[in-house]
Image: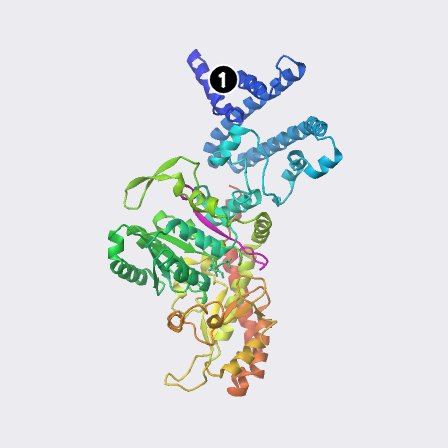
Amino acid sequence: MNDASVVLDAAAVFERARDLSPRRHTTGASDIAGLVEEQLEHFGIDPGTEYGKHLAGFAGHLYAANADLKLLWEQGAEELMGLARKDRIDRFSAQRFLAFQLAKILDTLQHPTRTAYQSLVNEPTDRARKGPYPIFDNLTALFSAKPVITRTATYIYACAEWVEDAFHGREMLHQIYSRLLNPTSISLANHIVDIECGKETGNYMAWNFNSGMAAVDAILSHLVGYQDIILASRNVYGGVYQLLEDWYGKTSNLDVGIEFFDGYSGEEFTAALSATEAKYADRIAQGRKIYVHVETPCNPHGLILDMPEISRISHERGHEVICDSTIGTPFLHRPLQREKLIERPDFVIHSYTKDISGHGATTAGCVIGRNERMFMPKNTSVEITDFAGNSRELNWNETLFWNVYYIKGAFLDADKAYEVINGLHTLDHRMVTKAINTLTLAEVLGNHPQINVNCSACKDHPNNAMLEKCMHLGLPVPLFTFDFEKGMDPQGGGGEFGHFSRLCFERFFDKLDPVFGHQVSLGTPNTIILCPAITSHSEMSKEALDGAGIAPTCIRVSVGLEDPRTLIAHLIEASRDTLDVEVAGFSGHFPGAGEIDEIYQRHYLDVHRRFIEHAPKFSEMLK
Ligand SMILES: Cc1ncc(COP(=O)(O)O)c(C=O)c1O
């Protein structure tokens, strides 16, 4: 090794060591020995004493260890994916053990630090008032097999320079205030990206919010400005419809142009986009922008829009795209895993409240987007290139974190984040069971001559091709509607509520609980039903309801985990008691008992076959 490389190495080691220093930005040192000297001086420790010598020795090891670890990471990250599985196992185990060794060192440090603390806070009443000193008490929580529920508003600072970094988003270890960052919420944010993005994980980040609506509002308020235009898919959740029309569209708020498009295909979307561009040509000439908001699969029918095509068309015309993928869940709908970037929406939203948490016990939501759109340290910027090939500088204050999340306070607290993490363990199993149940219910109901089933899983449904194209394994979304309008005389006749009077229909509906839960929301373990026209979509006008295909007798089914035949048995019994009074023999037109068993068994086997045939081969697992 020649002299020049020795000098270079020492400088490189110093650069990798210095961020452990209490003077990481203002240090006058140029090597580890200098950093150690400064550290002792910073805390008023005399290096000439025995204690000072030991402290200096220990701090020197830490600085050197920090540099070594960074080199280990830099080298290891590059070659990792090219290594054989055996080597990746060995590396993981070796690194995991290092984490235990570091914790053991902290544990050893606990004893002198605790005694020093006790010597300073020496009145028992004072100790009680302050509570336990947290750093070392929390140490063993590192080995909790589940993420720890971090119930705190505030965090302890290391030193002035580190906390200043934390305020600028340059020190992610140092959380400041739980409204901004909280370890349990961050654990969930990392986890949802892992699940949603697959191989693309490294390119995406998530921020969690207190509800799905807070997530929708966060991304809209981040992007959309005064007199911009939102082009949204027609069948959005009623709350989103209300947010768009009643808040964003209101002239005294942002006076946003709110437009809705019908249909599911790229062609239908193109026509609507062209019409919107023409309608708002004046605003666009003034620099106002169009944003595309798509809910797919969508409320209330669970129908599917061509997300890759809508993203591609929007991007080619310079518009950004938001996809509310709540109903699909990351298991069924994987818009961020498309090979081509142009076919991916810019942001994906989930209401965790639904199938992701899966138990109907919490409200929460998130926004997922590319790293550079979500966060960067204060006062930094990156160069980005749009789909037309134009580049521009993107600044820190244009990220979702600083522009909205940091300021508005709709954060997700630790308890709720924990609940969502727990729910996610069983997501794919729940969705497979729900797929079987959806197919069974849709087929049995659809075989009745007076019932319309609006479900993309039905082979003759116009939306079926989109299901095959966009949903994982072509599996159905556990949300569909049915109504009692089939076979109605278009000239009139029948009742005011499909084939029935309103009272008769309501008697039938009221008898469905408790086997069908009478609840709003969706994505719970039990099957729940509602009438969109009088609940979730009641904010919509009669015309808007007609446009969205929501008839008065429309019943939305959010399919649960039960044996679907128990639901069918109850529904037939309820219709015998109520609907038969006005339409004689109505309950007799459902398939017979043997046929219902056959339908259930067929779907049970078929969905499991699709699932298992798609699972990776064992030979791939050995790689
Ligand atoms: C598709 C969709 N997006 C967003 C939301 C709002 O989520 P939350 O109820 O968690 O606010 C809902 C609620 O039903 C929904 O169905």
- Residue 230: image location, x then y, percent: 35, 57
Magenta includes 203?
Answer: no
Query: Mark 1 falls on what kind of element?
Result: loop
323 relative to 577, above or below: above
Quick one: label 1, few (<14), some, or many (20+) residues within 10 Å? some
Depth check, front residue: 590 or 519: 519
Say left or right for 110 vs 244: right
Residue annotated with mark 1:
29
Magenta includes 359?
Answer: yes
- Residue 113: image location, x then y, percent: 68, 27
Residue drawn at x 40%, y 73% is: 542
- Residue 614: image location, x then y, percent: 49, 54
* Segment tinted magenta in the rendering: 355-374
Label tally: 1
Task: State the quadrant of the N terminus.
Answer: top left
Residue drawn at x 53%, y 42% is: 181
Depth check, front residue: 121 or 309: 121
Say left or right for 315 vs 20: left
The amino acid type, in three-letter code, at marker 1 is Ala
Q: Would residue 497 be seen by someone viewing this image from the given angle?
A: yes
Q: Quadrant of residue 570?
A: bottom right
Depth check, front residue: 354 or 136: 136
